[in-house]
Each structure stands twice: as C-alpha cells, then as structure tokens.
Image: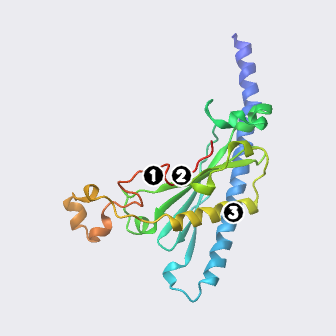
Amino acid sequence: MNHDEIKTNILSSLKDKSAVKQKVHDNTLKVMEDLKEILQELNQEFNEKLSDTDQRVHLEYTDNGLYGAQLKIAGDLLIFAMHSNVFEFDRGHGIWKTSYVKADKMASYCSIINIYNFLADSIKYNRKQDLGYLVGRIFINKDLYYFTEGKRQLGFFFNSFGNEVINKSSLTHIISLAINYTLAFDLLVPPYDTVKIASVEQISDRIQLSKLRTGKRLGFQFNSDDVTTAE
C-alpha cells in the first residue's frame, strides 16, 4: 500500500467507522439519560407504595455523573454504568450470524451499559475487597437497536438484534428484571474454608466483622446454575 492509498484509507476510516462510533456513543448517552429518568420514577413509585413500611427497605436513587447511576434496594445496590468507548465483537460472536449485521457491518459497533449488583454495605463500610456481580449488559448501536446479555430473563437471543429499537418501555422492562433478579439473588453463607483465616487488620478494624470480604457468592461459582445468556 503506497502513501496515497494509506491516506485514502485513513480518511475513509474517519468518515465512516469513526463517525459511526461517535453516533453510537451519543445514542447510548441519550439512553443513559432515559434510564436515569426511569430509575427516578421507579424510586418514587415504589417508595410511595412502601410509605407504611420500614424506611430501610425503601429505594434510594443516586446520580453518579454522566456515565452512571445507582439504585439502592434495601440491602442491595444496582449500579448502571455506561462504558465511554464503543466496541466491536470478535468473529466468533453470534451477532455476525444475524441478517441485520450481515447487511450492514457498521451495525455491529455497540456501546455498553453494564448493570452490576453489589451489597449496599460494601459501599457503606468501604469494603473495597467485596465482590459485585454483572447482572446484565445492554448493547446499543448506531440505529438504536439493542440486545442484552445477562442473568435469566435478561438474556435475549442475538437474532433479535435489528428488530427492536430501545425505548423507555424496553428500558423499564430491563430495569425491572434486574431489580427482580437482584432481590431473588440472596447472600449465601460462604463455605467455611474461605473465611477460616482472617488478618489482624480485618479483626481489629473499628467496624470489625463488617470489614471481612463479602459477596453474594463468595467461594461459590457464579455460572450456569443461575445464568441464562444469549447464544
């Protein structure tokens, strides 16, 4: 490839691929704004219905800046985090088998909104070693088409990609599924061998046992027994 061909290729990439990536980013940022509005609406709706219930089980919404938000649900925390970059899928991914992507390669570029579940106490007590779990992730492209990967009902099939534009209705459904899964995903007693040794720092900390590393499945595998992912 000579110098002129290289420059032509650079210009083509900037005009086509880079421009598409910027559109994907902007689309996903707008979806993130809608997601925040829905979280606030759900926060208000559920708290009104829980007005005569222990305050500690009420929801609590927090805006984490341009790319994030969180919803505290009793003892759990759902964190919604948009990645600032745009991704391409590896060649073995199922997305390449869809007629939509076969017809338009640029449709494969997606940005991601990740949904993580942490224990609320992990943040409250600054337990930096505690584990959180990826409940699901939303992929959004230049045309606002989407699909999800995740636990149980959050796992959709790739062949639905290109059939549905993401909107407030679908976002509300996704968020509701994430909340429902999180509330059903209980904190299990860790196996004895994973907690039988503790450091002096852990035990002598002023918060004492609340500083011991904790996760909903600490010492257990978090895999096919409770996961449904798209294939």
Q: Is residue 18 left or right of residue 219?
A: right
Residue positioned 75% across, 32% down in the render = 105
Residue positioned 47% across, 62% down in the render = 118
Residue 46 in the image: state x and y as whole percent.
63, 78
Say which label, 3 or 2, has the lower sequence index: 3
Outermost residue, bottom direction? 52
Whether residues under marks 3 and 2 lie with C-beta atoms below 8 angstroms apart, the answer is no
Dot 2 corresponds to which residue? 227
The N terminus: image quadrant: top right
In what element is the residue under mark 3? helix
Say which label, 2 or 1, has the lower sequence index: 1
3 vs 41: above or below:
above
Q: How is the image coloured?
A: rainbow
Q: Is residue 120 left or right of residue 201?
A: right
In what element is the residue under mark 2? loop
Q: Is residue 29 left or right of residue 120?
A: right
Local crowd size for mark 2, using a 10 Å CA cut-off: few (<14), some (14–19), many (≥20): some
Q: Quadrant of residue 80?
A: bottom right
Whether residues under marks 1 and 3 lie with C-beta atoms below 8 angstroms apart, the answer is no
Whether residues under marks 2 and 1 lie with C-beta atoms below 8 angstroms apart, the answer is yes
Amino acid bearing label 2: Val
Q: Is residue 224 left or right of residue 23?
A: left
Q: CA distance from mark 3 to mark 2?
A: 18 Å
Say which label, 1 or 3, has the lower sequence index: 3
Residue positioned 28% across, 68% down in the render = 209
Dot 1 corresponds to which residue? 222
Residue 193 in the image: state x and y as whole percent.
25, 55
Q: How many discs appear?
A: 3
Amino acid bearing label 3: His
Label ID, residue 173 = 3
